[in-house]
Image: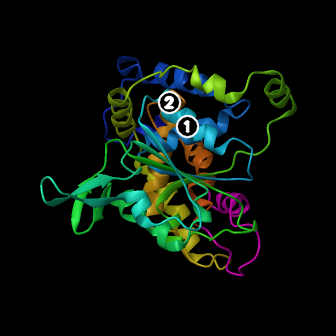
């Protein structure tokens, strides 16, 4: 049983965001519609991915090759009007291939830093688990601090800055599993899955997705997208809703069927993602169903069964949601 929206707002103590005044709802609806021209039949996945970026989070997409992981990342960058860079992760990739290198300039007789492909607003780390842990770790500082340190010098990354990483299922040959510390840097993990029959038929009949993507105009620009992120911050999250989030976190810490509980960072990620999902739904406050909608993507890659067996994703999150009553 869900609480009435008004009961959630009574103790919020926060000024409501004016969706009409900001034009946020209409802009977000247009963004989703544009992405749907390329990624067919995956509205919920598109909305979750957009929610992740609105919440200033990094996105991990895990699925088999050929379902559109790279295309989704490229489409989001283009529609949002953000600079895009792609890094193909391979077993011989070095950290300098990601961050950049300092080259000696004979004219100035000094070293000059040449930025690597990570200096873009949207960085696609394609097949991230094909690279060694050393190369993977090059992203840690960038994802957390939005800066990189090369040869003792710190370089600030563009704003906004997102990493959208794709990875193949862990059972496939030639993969290096991401450590927990790296997984935790991703606000969400998604899988795309196969299209339904109707979407797949349209896909087979239509033009090459790359041609559609090439002709797709940006819907907004980086400045407008940053404004939408600030609008997310104004979405109301009441004390009653925070009670629910804390109950979810505490349950994971006390549950005997989980190896370890969720960190405060996981709770912050859930709240930010739920606010973005509420904004995408053209609402000015977060409801429990917003939390439930984003919880599998936010919690799925952070939970591990105590037995070391079984599903580590949606099934455990669904069990968690069933075990915690809405306060």
Q: Position of residue 222 (x, y in %)?
A: 36, 31
Q: Is residue 311 above or below residue 272?
A: below
Q: Position of residue 69 (x, y in %)?
A: 65, 45
Q: Is residue 326 visible?
A: no
Quadrant where the C terminus lies? Answer: bottom right
Numbered tag placed on residue 74 in the rendering? 1
Quadrant where the N terminus lies? Answer: top right
Tag 2, which secondary structure?
helix
Do callouts 1 and 2 mark residues in contact (Cβ within 8 Å)?
yes
Dividing the picture into quadrants, the one containing residue 149 is bottom left
Tag 1, which secondary structure?
helix
| Residue at (73, 50) in percent of width and height | 65
Q: Position of residue 106 (x, y in %)?
A: 17, 57
Q: Which one is in front, 92 or 259?
A: 92
Dividing the picture into quadrants, the one containing residue 12 is top left
Magenta segment boundaries in residue numbering: 303-327
Numbered tag placed on residue 78 in the rendering? 2
Q: Is residue 177 above or below residue 162?
A: below
């Amino acid at each position: 049983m869900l609480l009435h929206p008004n009961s959630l707002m009574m103790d919020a103590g926060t000024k409501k965001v004016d969706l009409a005044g900001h034009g946020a709802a209409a802009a977000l609806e247009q963004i989703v519609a544009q992405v749907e021209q390329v990624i067919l039949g995956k509205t919920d996945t598109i909305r979750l991915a957009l929610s992740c970026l609105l919440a200033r989070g990094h996105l991990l997409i895990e699925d088999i090759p050929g379902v559109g992981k790279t295309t989704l990342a490229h489409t989001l960058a283009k529609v949002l009007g953000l600079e895009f860079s792609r890094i193909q992760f391979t077993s011989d990739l070095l950290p300098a291939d990601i961050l950049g290198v300092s080259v000696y300039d004979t004219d100035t007789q000094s070293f000059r830093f040449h930025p690597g492909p990570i200096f873009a607003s949207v960085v696609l780390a394609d097949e991230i688990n094909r690279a060694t842990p050393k190369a993977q770790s090059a992203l840690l500082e960038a994802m957390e601090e939005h800066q990189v340190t090369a040869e003792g010098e710190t370089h600030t990354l563009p704003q906004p800055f997102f990493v959208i990483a794709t990875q193949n299922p862990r059972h496939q040959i030639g993969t290096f599993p991401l450590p927990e510390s790296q997984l935790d840097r991703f606000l969400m993990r998604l899988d795309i899955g196969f299209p339904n029959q109707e979407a797949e038929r349209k896909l087979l009949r239509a033009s090459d997705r790359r041609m559609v993507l090439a002709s797709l105009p940006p819907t907004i620009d980086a400045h407008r997208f940053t404004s939408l992120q600030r609008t997310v911050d104004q979405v109301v999250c009441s004390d009653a809703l925070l009670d629910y989030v804390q109950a979810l976190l505490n349950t994971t810490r006390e549950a005997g069927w989980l190896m370890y509980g969720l960190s405060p960072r996981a709770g912050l990620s859930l709240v930010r993602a739920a606010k973005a999902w509420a904004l995408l739904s053209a609402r000015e406050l977060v409801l429990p169903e917003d939390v439930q909608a984003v919880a599998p993507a936010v919690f799925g890659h952070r939970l591990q069964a105590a037995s070391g067996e079984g599903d580590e994703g949606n099934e455990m999150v669904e069990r968690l949601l069933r075990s915690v009553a809405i306060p």
